[in-house]
Image (tube, grey):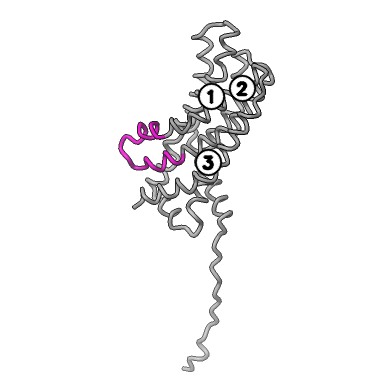
């Protein structure tokens, strides 16, 4: 038999690798879909924020001046603690099912994929706090200008909390009692965000102008966005070794 007649053309197709932007989009969509299936994991943090903000006026009393004075601080502390509550599952689920190892071996930089996970965390755990804050601020007698400033500072500050929280979550990944250690690591980093966020609303209430506070928050956001993904990726690689 003539073997030349048995030749079959073989078509080869080049392997097309996703770009880093496409990989980021895939991780972002995946985390958002998983969050919709596990509503209890992120709704708990939102409910915590609502309960803390709603119960303080009942405990303090109906004095308008007192409520107006403590309102910005209470709402910002509640947002900070609610953000910390939702950090536990940022990398833990992916670490348990092996997805994190696949991300580390991906052609896309791990820091880019971490950025996508942080963005997903903020969308499901930070953005609801921003949207609810003006409604909850009404209980404290805040003016419309103060409510707008509260929403603005949370819009800038909650991404900083998520970015810094990613570092803490990566450093404590797989560590026994990691939640307590994570709190000890993150609270000192969160203090400047808390001070300038609540201070901006307080300055707006006093008519002093909050531009300086907002500028510092924006600087913190830029610094965290530049440093946090790289630091979190380095910590994750250490945890995976």
Q: Does label 3 or label 2 sit earlier along the sequence?
A: 2
Pointer 2: residues within 10 angstroms few (<14), some, or many (20+)?
A: many
Q: Which residue is mark 2?
A: 201
Q: Which residue is mark 1?
A: 76
Residue 227 lies, in percent from the top left, at: 50, 45
208 vs 196, left or right, is: right
Magenta span: predominant SS is helix
Give yes or no for contact between labels 1 and 2 (Cβ–Cβ under 8 Å).
yes
- The correct choice, above or below, for 178 with respect to 51 in the image is below
Which of 230/12 is in front?
230
Residue 58 lies, in percent from the top left, at: 52, 9
Spatial separation of the CA atoms under disc 1 and disc 3: 19 Å
Q: Which mark is residue 224?
A: 3
**Residue for point 37% across, 33% down:** 179
Q: Does label 1 or label 3 sit earlier along the sequence?
A: 1
Pointer 3: residues within 10 angstroms few (<14), some, or many (20+)?
A: some
Q: Secondary structure at mark 2?
A: helix
Q: Secondary structure at mark 1?
A: helix
184 vs 135, left or right, is: left
- Give the magenta-colored segment's residue range: 166-185
Q: How many marks?
A: 3
Q: Does label 1 or label 2 sit earlier along the sequence?
A: 1
């Amino acid at each position: 038999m003539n073997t030349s007649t048995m030749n079959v053309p073989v078509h080869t197709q080049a392997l097309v690798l996703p770009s880093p932007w496409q990989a980021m989009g895939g991780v972002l969509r995946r985390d958002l879909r998983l969050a919709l299936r596990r509503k209890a994991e992120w709704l708990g943090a939102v409910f915590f924020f609502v309960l803390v903000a709603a119960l303080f006026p009942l405990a303090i009393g109906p004095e308008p001046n007192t409520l107006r004075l403590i309102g910005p601080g209470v709402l910002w502390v509640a947002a900070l603690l609610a953000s910390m509550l939702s950090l536990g599952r940022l990398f833990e689920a992916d670490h348990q099912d092996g997805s994190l190892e696949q991300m580390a071996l991906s052609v896309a930089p791990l820091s880019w994929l971490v950025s996508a996970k942080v963005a997903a965390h903020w969308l499901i755990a930070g953005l609801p706090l921003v949207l609810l804050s003006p409604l909850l601020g009404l209980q404290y007698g805040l003016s419309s200008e103060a409510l707008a400033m509260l929403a603005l500072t949370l819009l800038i500050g909650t991404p900083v909390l998520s970015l810094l929280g990613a570092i803490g979550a990566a450093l404590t990944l797989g560590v026994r009692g990691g939640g307590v250690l994570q709190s000890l690591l993150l609270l000192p980093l969160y203090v400047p965000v808390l001070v300038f966020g609540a201070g901006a609303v307080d300055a707006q209430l006093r008519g002093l102008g909050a531009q300086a506070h907002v500028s510092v928050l924006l600087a913190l956001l830029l610094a965290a966005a530049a440093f946090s993904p790289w630091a979190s990726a380095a910590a994750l690689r250490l945890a995976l070794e």
